[in-house]
Amino acid sequence: VSAIATFAIVSLLTSGEVRAESFYTTVYSETNSSQPEFLPIALATTVPLSHADRHFMEKALQVVRDEMRLSHLAVDRASNEHVREFANRVFAAQTQAEKTLTVMAASKGLTLRNDVRSDRYFTALNEKEGQDFDLYFVAHLIDVEEDTITLFEKSSQSDDPDVAAFATRTLNSMDAHLRESKELERELRENR
């Protein structure tokens, strides 16, 4: 985007004639949610990503992909219907987050690696069955969400508005997943 185009966009945004959301395409998730998810349109930016924002995007993508793998396995293998439904919602949310991160990174000239790392939790979960599987999946999600919330909270304060918006939206989703995971864990332990 040329300097003139960038100036025009900034002028429109600051004048109040155009809202920032208009620079995003609306994509509804496959869960038929009434809440739209916003994917950033690939606009070149004149401000390079900070080292902290690059690190956040790389770490966030790894967390998202790890949760996708675990929840996909749980959709297929969970014995408890509530756990299976929850895993399906987590998978849909993380799939959307992965798309958003990938598009946002590309718009900022960052290529995120697509490596699948060896995950001891995935291996351990894959070896479990029945109630043990369900409880291990839910307990691990609690650990993951609690560990990564701090990372997302810090990045929600980023100077880059796209990074801050993504981190904030994802934090809301993580908080909801964490609450539901804890409720499910309590339910599973009571019914053992």
Image (spheres, helix red, strand yellow):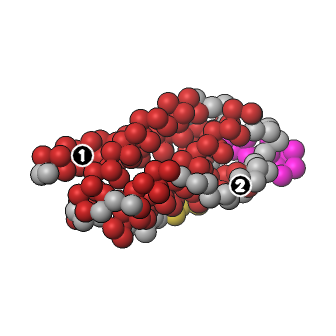
**Residue 21 in view here:** no
Nearer-the-camera pick, 192 or 17? 192
Q: Give the residue displayed 54% in from the left and 33% down from the top.
A: 151
Q: How crowded is mark 2: few (under 14 residues within 10 Å), some or many (20 or more)?
A: few
Q: Residues within 10 Å of mark 1 (few under 14, many from 20)?
A: many
Sequence order check, earlier mark of 2 and 1: 2
Residue furthest left as drawn: 191
The disc at residue 185 is 1
* 67 to the left or right of 78: right
Q: Give the residue displayed 79% in from the left and 51% down from the top.
A: 109
Instruction: State how far apart marks 2 and 1 are (Cα).
Output: 33 Å
* 47 to the left or right of 78: right
Mark 2 element type = loop
Determine which residue is flagged by label 2: 113
The residue type indicated by label 1 comes to: Glu
Q: Relative to 160, say whether 75 is above or below.
A: below
| Percent coordinates x, y for residue 142 in the rendering | 36, 42
Q: Relative to 179, say whether 32 is above or below.
A: below
Mark 1 element type = helix
* Most frequent secondary structure within the magenta stretch: helix
Residue 152 lies in the magenta-colored region? no
Magenta part of the protein: which range?
1-13
Quadrant in which residue 54 is drawn: top right
The disc at residue 49 is none
